[in-house]
Amino acid sequence: MSEAAILMKDLCKDFKVLNRHEGLKGSIRDLFSRDYKTISAVKDVSLTINKGEIIGYLGPNGAGKSTTIKMMTGVLEPTSGEIIVNGNIPYKDRTRNSERIGVVFGQRSQLWWSLPLIESFNLLRDIYMVKQKDYEDMLELYRSLVDLEPIIKKPVRQMSLGQRTLSDILAAFLHNPDIVFLDEPTIGLDVSMKAKIRDLIAGLNKTKNTTVILTTHDMGDVDALCRRIIIIDKGQKIYDNDIDHLKSYFGSYRTLKLRLADDTWEEHLIDESKEDIMQIILEKQKLSGVKDIQLQEISTEEVIKKIYEGGVA
Ligand SMILES: Nc1ncnc2c1ncn2[C@@H]1O[C@H](COP(=O)(O)OP(=O)(O)OP(=O)(O)O)[C@@H](O)[C@H]1O
Ligand SMILES: [Mg+2]
């Protein structure tokens, strides 16, 4: 048996979509049209994800992240290529695959809307045939990681978005799956709820050695949770390595923050090997007066932005 949690080789997913035409005439024509075009949502992606890793699966809007996750969870069948999750082919062994994975799609709850959370948990215990002892241990672990009191007796429909996300994540880990997929779990949450959710994910990964595949547009999630990131763009993998490796690639970049005479802050991303930081500060001083200076390492946010813009060869 291989130690890999997920293996993908030259994985592709194409969607055939109707070529839409404009106007009323166009819409009527579309009704009878066989004019299709093919979108390559995922293109020749190969990767290996090891057990226990937390992977940041990143990319701009429409890059193909959710499509990849849907193939990993068995919801979508690949157009071509190979995919193995926990030793199963997800779309063929969908039931067996789903017994050993957990899924959270941000903003869409998997829980029973009108049931108190504990009832949902009990149902999940029965569906996944979790042993009572393991179930109780898991609830005990949850209690050590988060305050269950405000949510455990509440139906999901009465919960705030943050409470619902928290509940969804707890539900996804309840049957102690090998892999949990989190598609934008912190979307729409406030800063303190984001921190709680990140701590919870980190705690569960650490205690249970669960592999976590995380897609997010929030680089705070990445900083808090991921050592390794995989970036896709237009369906293709463009980066797969440790986040530190990426930051050292941009090692000569600095973020220069200047507080100007009118108390506004201005930010500059500077490549130290090409530009003279002192020179920039002096020029700004002449132009608008500088009251305060901060010089920082390049942030993950800026690193990722640079890559999306084509900053890495
Ligand atoms: N069911 C579908 N039918 C047709 N096209 C689809 C379908 N699902 C996704 N696509 C297209 O495939 C591409 C990748 O979409 P996907 O949802 O995987 O992107 P994403 O990386 O998750 O983006 P986001 O960050 O916005 O969630 C997009 O061009 C999208 O329009
Ligand atoms: Mg998506």
Image (cartoon, grey):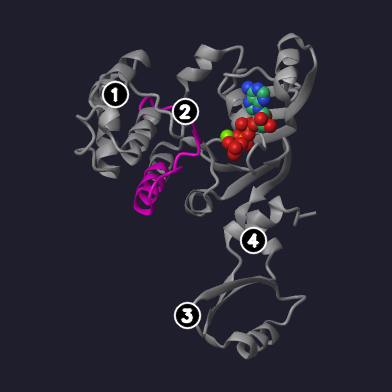
| Image mark for residue 263 | 3
Q: Residues within 10 Å of mark 3 (few under 14, many from 20)?
A: few
- Distance CA(mark 2)–CA(mark 4): 30 Å
Q: Which residue position is annotated with label 4?
A: 247
Q: Amino acid at mark 1?
A: Phe
Q: Residue furthest top?
A: 32
Dot 4 and dot 1 residues touching (CB under 8 Å): no
Q: Amino acid at mark 2?
A: Val
Question: Position of 308 compared to 135: left or right?
Answer: right
- Distance CA(mark 2)–CA(mark 1): 15 Å
Start-end of magenta stretch: 174-201
Please name whichever residue, 108 or 181, is drawn nearer the observer in this view of the structure: 108
Q: Residues within 10 Å of mark 2 (few under 14, many from 20)?
A: many
In what element is the residue under mark 2? strand
- Distance CA(mark 4)–CA(mark 3): 30 Å
Is 164 contained in the magenta span?
no
Q: Amino acid at mark 4?
A: Lys
Q: Nearer the viewer, mark 3 or mark 1?
A: 3
Name the quadrant where ligand 2 sits. top right
Q: Residues within 10 Å of mark 1 (few under 14, many from 20)?
A: many
Above or below, 162 against 271 in this view is above
In what element is the residue under mark 3? loop
- Distance CA(mark 2)–CA(mark 3): 46 Å
Task: Tell me: is circle 1 under 8 Å from ligand 2.
Answer: no
Above or below, 253 against 9 in this view is below
| Residue plotted at (37% across, 36% down) | 165
